[in-house]
Amino acid sequence: MNPTTITTLFNLSEAQLIAAQLEGAGFHPFLPDEIESTGFTLGQGGIRIQVPAEEAAAAKEFLAASAA
């Protein structure tokens, strides 16, 4: 898997919710910063949501459509 970051959030619950939505839609999300989210994440730029590179464009479209 060649992971690609599709969005970055600063709230773990929100990141987990979006990852669950992506998974429900057939994507394969991964939160590489989930464990570190207890305090260091804000200083490091947030919690990344990643998917395999071949899913990135479709996952971004899915998130954009979900936000509308």
Image (spheres, rainbow, N blue to C red):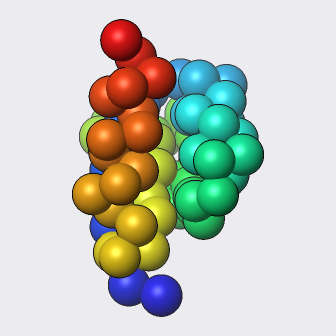
Residue at image position (44%, 74%) is: 52
Give x and y (percent) for residue 58.
35, 54
Position of residue 34 in the picture relative to residue 59 (left or right): right
Q: Is the residue 68 above or below the residue 54 in the image?
A: above
Which part of the image, by quadrant, shows the C terminus?
Answer: top left
Task: Give 45 or 31, whichever is nearer the viewer.
Answer: 31
Q: Is the residue 14 above or below the residue 48 in the image?
A: above
Quadrant hosting residue 22: top right
Number of marks: 0
Q: Is the residue 41 above or below the residue 68 in the image?
A: below
Q: Is residue 53 visible?
A: yes
Task: Give 63 or 36, whichever is nearer the viewer.
Answer: 63
Quadrant hosting residue 5: bottom left
Give x and y (percent) for residue 28.
60, 65
Q: Is the residue 32 above or below the residue 2 in the image?
A: above
Residue at image position (59%, 24%) is: 14
Q: Residue furthest top?
A: 68
Residue at image position (31%, 41%) is: 61
Q: Is residue 19 visible?
A: no
Q: Residue furthest bottom?
A: 1
Give x and y (percent) for residue 4.
32, 67
Task: Give 5 or 58, whichever is nearer the viewer.
Answer: 58
Position of residue 40 in the picture relative to residue 58 (left or right): right
Position of residue 59 in the picture relative to residue 39 (left or right): left
